[in-house]
Image (spheres, rainbow, N blue to C red):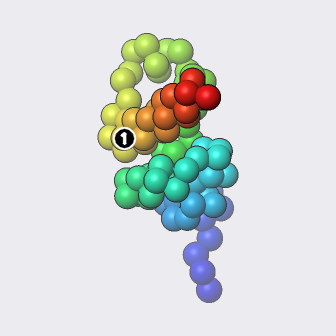
Amino acid sequence: MAASHKGNSKRVPVTSADEIRRVAGPINDETVAAILRVGPTFEELEAATRYALGEGDEADRAGHPLAGRVAQLYEILSAEEADEDEARAAR
């Protein structure tokens, strides 16, 4: 019988493009691949996505810089957003 992750579902690793897009929204395949290489948990991906969308807790954003995998994910997601902004400006 498979182990249940009910209580720790946010600490389970993200393992598919569908899971990533469910959390981060519509992103390109290159960005998905970069995120998978980092090997984040759902909790880490959710935190990075909140920060990338400007929704991180103000106290945390001001006083505790991102570190580790969350920082890596934030950089990846921010680059995706910058690419989208450039594409919109070029139209």
Residue 55 screen position, x and y as percent: 60, 24
> Seen from this angle, which residue lies furthest front?
91
- Would you say 12 lies left or right of 18 here? left
Give the total number of marks visible in the rendering.
Answer: 1
Residue 73 visible in rendering: yes
Of 62 and 1, the residue lying toward us = 62
Instruction: Report the residue at 45% width, 58% height from top.
Output: 33
The residue where tag 1 is placed is 72
The N terminus - image quarter: bottom right
- Would you say 6 lies left or right of 39 here? right
- Which type of secondary structure does the marked residue at label 1 adopt? helix
Instruction: Report the residue at 43% width, 13% height from top.
Output: 62
Of 58 and 36, the residue lying toward us = 36
The C terminus - image quarter: top right
> Seen from this angle, which residue lies furthest left?
68
Residue 43 visible in rendering: no
Residue 71 screen position, x and y as percent: 37, 36
Instruction: Report the residue at 57% width, 24% height from top.
Output: 89
Tell me if mark 1 has few (under 14), some (14-19) or many (20+) residues whose alpha carbon lies within 10 angstroms of its own: some
Instruction: Reply above or below: 63 against 89.
Output: above
Instruction: Reply above or below: 58 against 21.
Output: above
- Would you say 8 lies left or right of 62 here? right
Amino acid marked by disc 1? Gln
Residue 25 screen position, x and y as percent: 65, 44
Instruction: Reply above or below: 86 against 63.
Output: below
Of 58 and 29, the residue lying toward us = 29
